[in-house]
Image (cartoon, grey):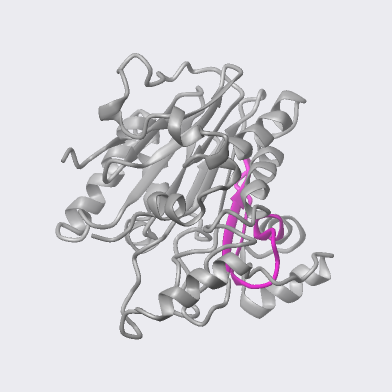
Amino acid sequence: MTIKRRKFIQQSVAGTAMASTGLWACQPATNDEIPAAVVPQSSGTMPLVIATWDNFEATQAAAKVLEKGGSALDAVEAGARVPEADPNDLSVGLGGLPDIKGVVTLDACIMDDLGNAGAVCFLQGIKHPISVARKVMEQTSHVMLSGQGALEFALEQGFVEENLLTVSSKKHWEEWLKDQKPFGETNFENHDTIGILALDAQGNISGACTTSGMAFKLHGRVGDSPIIGAGMYVDNEVGGACATGVGEYVMKTLGSFLIVELMRQGKSPQEACEEAIKRIVKRQPKLYREYEVGYLAINKSGVYGAYGTEKGFEYTLYQDGENNKYPAEHFLKS
């Protein structure tokens, strides 16, 4: 059994702000441990912000933008920037776990209600890839920039280059090196993505996705997070979706695009997320039991859905003035 991302972070970063405030202790971890009445039902109200995992500060930052009448686009960027700047978050931006060479490489994408999109992949040395992705969307005719080209563009746009490998992340990498798998063997441990979707007071939807990718991955590996239609997708006529977990599985099914299209065909966000997970289960009948994938979705009415391959996937929801973490339903029941 691999160590799942949330468990890994809990074990590795004891004493972080989240642990010290007791949020893990006060929030149930699974649907099996939470009374049915406590699991939220979609109220269909707006504004709304939903994010993967326990990202209270991210959804709160996004909600503040919406409460002031800001756009969904500004909200998701503001939300994504919070974990990107947190050195204790091992999955995003500053402090993200490095690749096999000890290099922190970042992927991100953003999409607005008009269908515009921007992305960066294999970006190094820039703490806020989500903001660089937005610049790609707004300042160029392209959708994605990668590697050195993305870095040069970011510097031209005024971003500051810095070392993203923290002392803590370097220590984790050095410890992993002592017992690493053969070169070229995919490391499915310690993967995660911060996906965030927002519906503003005008009824417009935007989404963002940002990550440092799979920990200790092969140098040059890019996952689903910067790929429009895989890690995140928005269609303002229908809704939006985002993914987290092992990106290879999400890319092979274009999960976020699939979810939005299923909603277009009449499925609810919850039904669409469940169908997207079932596609993975069907195509990966042996591996899906070992490696986690989770989806979130919202529609134009402010109804949302969340579903994962297994117990443990969580999401944070801001709606009706409340900001809380909840367990998602899951395919595997044992």
Q: Residue 239's x, y, as percent?
A: 49, 35
Residue at 51 percent of width and 33 percent of height: 23
Q: Is residue 238 visible?
A: no
Task: Give 82 or 129, whichever is nearer the viewer.
Answer: 82
Q: Residue 133's x, y, as percent?
A: 66, 59
Residue at 39 percent of width and 81 percent of height: 178
The quadrant where residue 156 appears: bottom right
The quadrant where residue 39 appears: top left
The quarter of the picture where the N terminus appears is bottom left
The quadrant where residue 131 appears: bottom right
Task: Give 266 or 316, whichever is nearer the viewer.
Answer: 316
Residue pushed farthest bottom? 183
Residue range of the region highlighted in magenta in the rendering: 106-132
The quarter of the picture where the C terminus appears is top left
Residue at 42 percent of width and 74 percent of height: 176
Judge whether residue 295 is colored magenta. Answer: no
Q: Residue 195's x, y, as percent?
A: 52, 46
Task: Give 27 or 58, whichever is nearer the viewer.
Answer: 27
Horizontal side of 118 relative to 156 (left or right) equals: left
Q: Is residue 244 above or below residue 133?
A: above
Horizontal side of 154 relative to 184 (left or right) equals: right
Residue at 29 percent of width and 27 percent of height: 33
Q: Is residue 225 above or below residue 277?
A: below
Q: Residue 118's x, y, as percent?
A: 63, 58
